Image: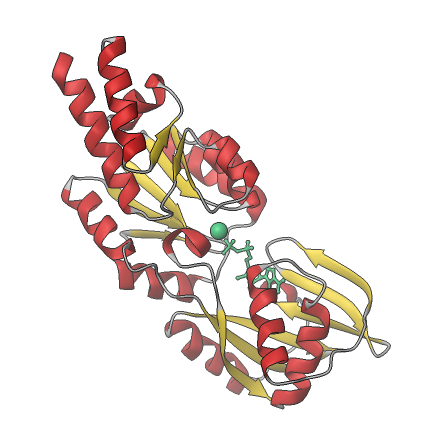
């Protein structure tokens, strides 16, 4: 494209809240055939809320929130907010540790306690009843965290994060244009599938550790796909850099924004559709 056409293209997209770093990025967009999305904060609003507690509600929430008070994770905020709303007094914990992509651990009242996914359970036994309850909640598109004390699972907390109002429309528009859509998340398979179905996403890659997200993008590229990745978190930065086009949410972390070739000011997936339209127009004009 001529320099003028590129300037017109990037200026037009900026007006629509789609910031494109340079003309090369705009050109890459027209070759994309696969769009991969992070879940939390990208497809969903990113403000999860506690919806269900299984077990002795007060005990489960007291222990979970006492640990989560030390974490910055969106799930932690949900648990602490619920405890505050229920006026539950929190205790201080010792030896707090965050296990990336899995959960948190600490000493609570001289016992080892944890809050997190089933990846943290290791050799701790869980009752059939609790297991079935967890699956049922996950199929309702709720993230389930297990709360453990000593060698016992004392309960479950279900946390829900709803899709952004425009996510479904944006995904429909991308599919209409022949693009393949994929969700890439650290969350559990059941939850990921339930949300994917709500918004119409074709494929789900779930249970992925933060350090493995970029590798999953690489695998899609090695299979011959031209990949855009859309994300917002610290964890998403390597995937944003690895993708042919990295698209960051404007509400995302600084490192995500720096890693993206495109930034969506309105935090809304329709921005991906707009970027695609402008790129096609800019590059068809001179071809
Ligand atoms: P995402 O891909 O949605 O950003 P993460 O990789 O941050 O997910 O986390 C993956 C999973 O690890 C969560 O769904 C949850 O089960 C567990 N987890 C991570 N951090 C925490 C935490 N602070 N409290 C409870 N569970 C957590
Ligand atoms: Mg995220």
Viewer-proximal residue, 130 or 18? 18
Extreme residue toward the right, this view = 110
Residue 272 shown left or right of residue 90 in the figure: left
Give the farthest residue toward the front: 15
For image coordinates 27% across by 9% down, the residue present is 3
Task: Report the side of 57 relative to 96 (left or right).
Answer: left
Residue 279: image location, x then y, percent: 23, 26
Instruction: Name the residue located 49 percent from the left edge and 72 percent from the top edge.
Output: 49
Q: Is 162 placed left or right of 252 in the picture?
A: left
Is there any visible trace of residue 146 in the rendered image?
yes
The quadrant where residue 44 appears: bottom left
Look at the picture and state if 162 lies above or below 283: below
Residue ranking furthest to the bottom: 56
Left or right of 266: which side holds 282? left
| Residue 33 can be seen, yes or no | no
Q: Nearer the viewer, residue 12 or 72?
A: 12
Q: Residue placed at 19% from the left, 33% from the top? A: 277
Please identify the quadrant where the N terminus is shown: top left
Residue 87 position within the rendered picture, expressed as x and y whole percent measured from the top left: 65, 85
State which quadrant residue 195 falls in: bottom left
Quadrant where the C terminus is found in the figure: top left
Q: Which of 49/204 is in front?
A: 49
Total tally of numbered discs in the picture: 0
């Amino acid at each position: 494209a001529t320099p003028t056409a590129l300037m017109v293209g990037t200026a037009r997209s900026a007006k629509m809240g789609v910031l494109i770093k340079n003309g090369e990025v705009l050109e890459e967009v027209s070759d994309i055939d696969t769009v991969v999305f992070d879940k939390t904060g990208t497809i969903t609003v990113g403000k999860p809320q506690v919806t269900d507690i299984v077990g002795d509600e007060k005990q489960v929430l007291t222990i979970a929130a006492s640990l989560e008070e030390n974490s910055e994770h969106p799930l932690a905020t949900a648990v602490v907010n619920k405890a505050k709303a229920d006026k539950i007094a929190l205790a201080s914990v010792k030896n707090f540790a965050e296990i990336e992509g899995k959960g948190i651990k600490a000493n609570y009242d001289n016992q080892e306690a944890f809050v997190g996914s089933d990846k943290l359970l290791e050799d701790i036994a869980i009752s059939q009843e609790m297991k079935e309850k967890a699956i049922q909640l996950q199929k309702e598109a709720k993230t389930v965290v297990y709360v453990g004390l000593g060698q016992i699972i004392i309960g479950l907390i279900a946390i829900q994060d709803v899709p952004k109002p425009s996510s479904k429309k944006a995904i429909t528009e991308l599919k209409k244009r022949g693009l393949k859509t994929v969700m890439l998340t650290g969350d559990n398979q059941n939850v990921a599938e339930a949300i994917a179905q709500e918004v119409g996403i074709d494929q789900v890659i779930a249970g992925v550790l933060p350090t493995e997200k970029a590798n999953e993008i690489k695998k899609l590229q090695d299979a011959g796909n031209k990949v855009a990745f859309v994300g917002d978190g610290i964890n998403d930065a390597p995937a944003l850099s690895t993708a042919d086009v990295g698209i960051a949410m404007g509400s995302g972390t600084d490192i995500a924004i720096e890693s993206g070739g495109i930034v969506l000011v309105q935090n809304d997936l329709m921005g991906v559709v707009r970027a695609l339209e402008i790129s096609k127009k800019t590059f068809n004009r001179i071809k």
